[in-house]
């Protein structure tokens, strides 16, 4: 997937440059449109390439973390103690009456 993003980034970058030059030639010297194509191609190419790099780094970190966790020995303190009965004891409120101050 990271290779796909990097390839899309390169395609956007090259396509933006070629598109900017072609639009400049077709529009007979309209610099604004040509530069807009160049800048948008560069920005989109950089974004796609950066997402590909981030994706690659995340997958490498994921693989390393799984390897480290696999190599760690199981420790007796890793198991969580049972929670037990979590119900509140409401017997003290059985005959409670609300006053005007409450």
Image (cartoon, grey):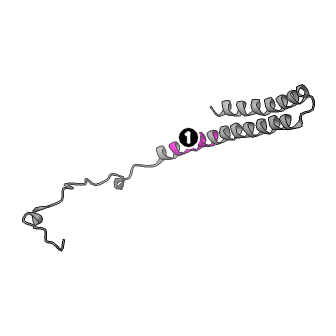
In the rendered structure, which segment of residues is drawn in magenta? Answer: 56-66
Left/right of residue 55 with respect to residue 12 in the rendered view: left
Residue extending farthest right: 29
Q: Is mark 1 on a helix, strand or loop?
A: helix
Specify the principal SS of the magenta part: helix
Q: In which quadrant of the rendered image does the C terminus lie?
A: bottom left
Above-or-below relation of 84 to 52:
below
Residue 42 lies, with reference to residue 79, above or below; the image says: above
| Horizontal side of residue 89 vs 7, given as left or right | left
Of 35 and 54, the residue lying toward us: 35
Residue carrying label 1: 63
Q: Residue furthest left?
A: 95
Spot occupied by residue 19 in the image (x, y as percentages of width and height): 82, 28
Residue at 80%, 34% in the rendered image: 37
Q: Position of residue 7 (x, y in %)?
A: 72, 30
Q: In which quarter of the image is the N terminus?
A: top right
Give the image location of residue 68, x and y in percent. Answer: 51, 46
**Residue 98 position by quadrant:** bottom left
Q: In which quarter of the image is residue 58?
A: top right
Q: Does the magenta stretch include residue 58?
A: yes
């Amino acid at each position: 997937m990271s290779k796909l993003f990097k390839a899309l980034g390169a395609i956007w970058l090259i396509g933006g440059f070629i598109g900017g030059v072609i639009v400049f030639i077709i529009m007979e010297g309209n610099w604004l449109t040509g530069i807009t194509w160049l800048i948008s191609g560069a920005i989109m190419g950089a974004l796609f390439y950066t997402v590909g790099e981030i994706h690659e780094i995340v997958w490498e970190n994921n693989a390393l973390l799984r390897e480290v966790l696999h190599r760690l020995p199981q420790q007796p303190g890793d198991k969580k103690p049972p929670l037990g009965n979590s119900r509140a004891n409401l017997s003290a409120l059985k005959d409670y009456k609300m006053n005007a101050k409450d």
